[in-house]
């Protein structure tokens, strides 16, 4: 089955850039997603990228997609304390009807 | 964006009792809803896909008799944890996709279940 992997933890200083990485195995998806989960809450869709794109920028967020290496990354510029959360990449599988989530990366922003 | 509401947000129940969790799409119709389970500091694991008017599709290893899913209308799916035990304690999250457009799935805020 589909396997989506992320590093578990990332710590950055406020104002620095954060880069969260994700690797996946199913390359047939039309989209790939990034979600944010704050403590005790559901998931919030941050951004997504079409599989035929290499890069997408949305304000402080930049998504890079390397289809050859099946690697996805999320860069957060000028990271703030409010960005502290768990970030999940997600790959639609089963014909796009189901989401397979990565293991999640906990981002901690320090002052 | 669209809103998905889960109720309750948290529940504590005694071992052996059953608990029902509701997932509602508030401003859109959802033919399909998804139920996930999340253990502390872990990812979301898809439990089942709930289809309006038909039986749910369960993922491998998920006991359909233990986790009863009903999707009686286009805006409501329920997950009932039957004869709950402490090992069922977890964070349960539902998501719903707007039947009319797009592929984005909207998530509820989750339900924290603690079985004592």
Image: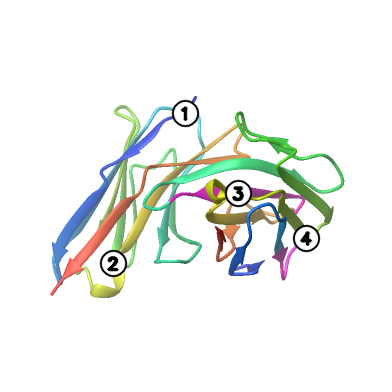
Q: What residue lies at 63% left-to-right and 49% top-to-bottom? A: B35
In the image, residue A75 above or below residue B27: above
In the image, residue A110 above or below residue B61: below
**Chain identity of mark 4:** B
In front: mark 1 or mark 3? 3
The residue to which callout 1 is attached is: A2
Q: Is residue B26 magenta?
A: yes
Q: Secondary structure at mark 4?
A: strand
State the image quarter where residue B72 is shown: bottom right
State the image quarter where residue B51 is shown: top right
Is A60 placed left or right of A35 in the picture? left
Q: Secondary structure at mark 3?
A: loop
- What's drawn in magenta, residue-wise? B24-39
Outermost residue, top side: A1
The answer to which of marks 3 and 4 sits earlier in the sequence is 4
The residue to which callout 3 is attached is: B85
């Amino acid at each position: 089955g589909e396997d989506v992997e992320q590093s578990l933890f990332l710590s950055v200083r406020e104002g620095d850039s954060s880069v969260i990485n994700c690797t996946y195995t199913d390359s047939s998806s039309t989209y790939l997603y990034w979600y944010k989960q704050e403590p005790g809450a559901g998931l919030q869709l941050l951004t997504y990228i079409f599989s035929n794109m290499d890069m997408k920028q949305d304000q402080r967020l930049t998504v890079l997609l390397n289809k050859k290496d099946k690697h996805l990354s999320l860069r957060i510029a000028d990271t703030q304390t409010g960005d502290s959360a768990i970030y999940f990449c997600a790959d639609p599988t089963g014909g796009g009807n189901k989401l397979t989530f990565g293991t999640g990366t906990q981002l901690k922003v320090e002052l | 964006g669209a809103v998905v509401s889960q109720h309750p947000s948290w529940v504590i129940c005694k071992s052996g009792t059953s608990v029902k969790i509701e997932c509602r799409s508030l401003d859109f119709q959802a033919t399909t809803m998804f139920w996930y389970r999340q253990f502390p500091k872990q990812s979301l694991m898809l439990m089942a896909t709930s289809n309006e008017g038909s039986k749910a599709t369960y993922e491998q290893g998920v006991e359909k008799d233990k986790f009863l899913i009903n999707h009686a209308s286009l805006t409501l799916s329920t997950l009932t944890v039957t004869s709950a035990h402490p090992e069922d304690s977890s964070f349960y999250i539902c998501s719903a996709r707007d039947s009319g457009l797009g592929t984005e799935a909207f998530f509820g805020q989750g339900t924290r279940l603690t079985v004592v």
